[in-house]
Amino acid sequence: MTRKQFLLIGMAGGVALGQQKSTQPLDAGSAAATARLQAVIDSDPLLRAMYEELNRAKVLRTLGQEPYYIELTVDDAETFGVSATLGSAFAPNRARLRPVRALIRVGTPQFDNTNSIFSDYYSGSRFDSGVLPQDNDLAALRHALWLSLDRAYKTASEAIGRKQAAVRGVTSNENLADFWPSPGKVQLDDVRATRIDDEGWKARVKALSGLFLAYPEITSSNVEYQFSGGISYVLTSDGSAVRVAEQIAMMTVRASRQTPDGTVVYDGLCQASLDPAQFPDDAALRLSVEGVARNVSALAGAPVGESYTGPVLFAGAASAQVFGEVFGSHLGVVRRLVSEPGRNMPMPASEFDGRIGSRVLPDWMELVDDPTLTEYKKRPLAGHYHADLEGVFPAPLTLVEKGVLKALLTTRQPVKGMTASNGHARLYSGFGVKSARISNLFVRAAKVESDAQLKTRLLDMIKQQGKPYGMIVRKMDFPSAGAVEELRRIIARGGRSGGGRPVSTPVLAYKVFPDGREELVRGMNFRSLSTRAFRDIVAAGDQEHQFDFIENGAPLALMGAGNFIVGCSVVAPSVLFEELELEPGNEDRPKPPVVPPPPFGE
């Protein structure tokens, strides 16, 4: 239950979600798997069309290149979305979606048409629409799939020629294959459709957005609910066949205002659940929305922070956020694309590339990613899924053991230090490959202290170092609730301070003075916060904090960005860093509105 389609403009709509009776995956080729596949093919026109066209495509060789791997994925999804501001709702959006993605690999697993700047480029005419008919007419479905596979084959044949020409003119030290084999598995669940309460959610969103009426100084606010559910299909030529029901619901809240000096302060939240029935109740949602409003008001009255170097405590959910953002973004290695001279495409490098066996955390900490769990301590997890986008079934994976990096999140694209896919292909990234992402990431510490002891430890450290104060971060802007302009400023700021991937800003950052008094400050940014800083964690709390979020592949997982999303969860204790750097922003500030806002009421 991970991947869902959303339209970028306004939230795509729809009303049905898939429920399923789950079955255990079977080894492809076994008698049980063959019987199960045949039974489902006979009853499911969409799967039958996919199966028949994939088998027909195996004989493609007209252009001199014979496919060695074919992959078809289809999401049969219905979506619903509604947003509101100041108690007034916008028109709900509903849609029925059947996107199809066809991938064909030609050449050999050692060298094929993928991972090149030409992998997705086809110079001919495109006759396929990228979507399937909504009616289960076998002839119409097969026709659309035939066109998709035809273009995929032509694209692959053209791409491998250009890739071969490109590598002849360069010398590379990266002697890696292009594709890992994976044993085929079959999981074809029985699914049925239920309905979501459209009108009920519209009323809830309106009521929640109306809470901002009590904060007239807030210039912009919005509450948005999105849901997508249905059936996901994956069929591959090496025997994997997956049909599972998937659904995801999320509610995003954003609010912002300008301070007298022109600075825009903002806050937001994103509630995510794989089961709408397990969404927080109205009372909990009200508290969350009111918390955003109070944070924005408090930030507007807070002083601007100063440059700081010293110990920093990430308390509560902020610790899970920083692990999910900083650590999680580097656990999946992205390989350099094959390109022509002068046409290089910059790719975000992973700080863990080639570092298997290196110490990345204190020796009393470990990291485990477990997509198989649906809940933890009776609380639902957002990162559960059955199979990834390549039909590979995941298992619990120890990433860091006693502080040492033992494994990376992998897809079927080979990377240094690993030997096979571990089923973490969760996002489409183009160029014929997928991106690896965390699912349910657990940060565990063997040595723990209470929250009060952590704060005492922080105060002792600043006294020993002669610092006038320390810093506590209680909330990060991740996923980011800022505007696209703010994201551009963060990326530019990161380039000026040493490059690397951008890191979100702390929303709630507090100066902590030696007497224990705390003062909220605003406008602070981390300077060069990378995975290397995590080796210097000096203490961890004894309470675990769960943070669920939506990953969309955009920088800072910017809310509303991307057209393909997955749910993720991070469970982590509070952590104390020995030394981090923060600095105030110095960008130009927009001018406030010329005319004051209209009154909210009589």
Image (tube, rainbow, N blue to C red):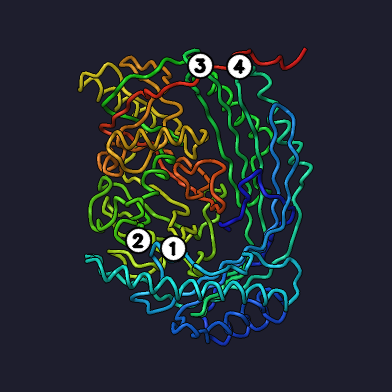
Residue position for label 3: 259
* Residue receiving disc 4: 217
Q: Residue at coordinates 60% horizontally, 38% vertically from top-left?
A: 252
Residue 387 on image: x %, y %: 52, 66
> Image quarter for residue 214?
top right
Mark 1–mark 2 contact, CB under 8 Å?
A: yes
Q: Tag 3: Cα neighbours inside 10 Å, few (<14), some, or many (≥20)?
A: some
Mark 4 and mark 2: span between their CA atoms?
48 Å
Q: Which residue is mark 1?
A: 431
Mark before the other along the chain sequence, 4 or 2: 4
Q: Which residue is mark 2?
A: 337
Q: CA distance from mark 1 to mark 2?
A: 8 Å
Q: CA distance from mark 3 to mark 1?
A: 44 Å
Q: Quadrant of residue 85?
A: top right
Mark 1: amino acid: Phe
Mark pair 2, 3: CA separation: 44 Å
Secondary structure under badge 3? loop
Mark 2 or 3, nearer chain start: 3
- For badge 2, the amino acid type reads Leu
Q: Position of residue 539 (x, y in %)?
A: 30, 36
- For residue 41, which quarter of the picture? bottom right
Q: Nearer the viewer, mark 2 or mark 3?
A: 2
Viewer-side label of 4, 2: 2
Against 482, residue 49 (above or below) is below
Residue at x 69%, y 52% (from the top left corner): 79
Mark 2 or mark 1, which is nearer the start of the sequence?
2
